[in-house]
Amino acid sequence: MASAMNGTGERKVVLVTRRTRLEELVAKHHTLAQAKFYLEHLGADFADYVRENAAYARSLDTVVTTLQGWGRWQMVDRGFLTNFVFGADDIVVALGQDGLVANTMKYLDGQPLVGLNPEPQRWDGVLLPFAPGDLAALLPEVASERRAAKAVTMAQATLSDGQVLRAVNDLFIGPRSHTSALYELRLGQRRELQSSSGLIVATGLGSTAWLKSVVTGSFGITRSLVRGALPDYQPEPWDTPRLTFAVREPFPSRSSSAEIVFGHATRDEPLVLRSRMPEHGVIFSDGMESDFLRFSAGLQATITIADRQGRLVV
């Protein structure tokens, strides 16, 4: 969807949207009535889905009205991001939850990204500092480079066959199903064969998310076992020049070790993994299991900091 209306904006704006929960259900069950029947049969609150959908529609209407007065703009659903080509001078606006901002950022190469919270009463919005009504005043400042942007370090997984996957929050390396992940792990001069339920490799931004839950759970188990005080978990800055990895549920055995279970990777010392999984091995980013690389036996993955950084407008 695009607008050719005359406006003050010389730089094109790309608006990234996502389906609401209600829209996803209607797409799956074909009609609104069938979606309602499905939800109510499960005991879910259908009215809450309707309220969320209506709030998103109102926010989208506000944003579209602003962009129609701006000039060149285009709208793209997040499902098409993998094949969408952003212009070097584009301004990107994401209307949705934090996950939409993260999912959008990993496809950018330095373009400023504006996160808009469609429903502040529902979403905390760590990456959504603005409301839809702020966009009209915000765009001229972003277009003229007068608005500050926060640098965000991204992770990158590069396979030995040349495939690349980036992440804003974290990478997961492990089994696609509930089986053991088998691999060789190398960090600097240390290496070992491991069996686990997979690894989380987090950026500074991601250190407040999935990685935090992994470490919190480990601390809780350790406190119960040793009855001692442990240090408080401290997330990394968003632009930290290193990644943090944690091995989930490592299992020591005659053929596997569990010594290198937590640490850091940098450009000078990347984390290197070689898959020993004949099937079901995957690498996915930012919780998007549909956006993955197959990590089958023999393939090697080099995990390090991406050359590009995200720029989140603040």
Image (cartoon, grey):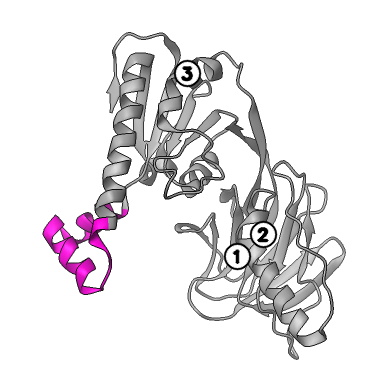
Q: Position of residue 120 (x, y in %)?
A: 44, 43
Identify the residue under disc 3. Answer: 137
Name the one closer to the observer, 214 or 302.
214
Contact between labelled residues 1 and 2, with CB atoms less than 8 Å apart: yes
Q: What amino acid does circle 2 point to?
A: Val
Question: In the structure shown, which secondary structural element does the residue marked by tag 3 occupy?
Answer: helix
Callout 2 secondary element: strand
Percent coordinates x, y for residue 36 in the rendering: 17, 62
Q: State the predominant SS element of the stretch in magenta.
A: helix
Check disc 1 and give the amino acid type. Answer: Ile
CA separation, marks 1 and 3? 42 Å
**Is 122 left or right of 224, judged from the image as shown?**
left
Q: Is residue 257 in sight in this rendering? A: no
The residue that appears at 65% across and 62% down in the rendered structure is 211
**Image quarter in which the C terminus is found:** top right
Counting residues from the start of the chain, the first of labels 1 and 3 encountered is: 3
Q: Label 3: how many residues lie within 10 Å, few (<14), some (14-19) or many (20+)?
A: few
Q: Is residue 61 depicted above or below 51 in this figure?
A: above
Specify start and end residues of the magenta stretch as a single range.
Answer: 21-47
Q: Is residue 17 magenta?
A: no
Residue at left 32%, top 42%?
Answer: 56
The percent position of residue 189, horizontal first and vertical second, equals 87, 64
Q: Which residue is mark 1?
A: 173
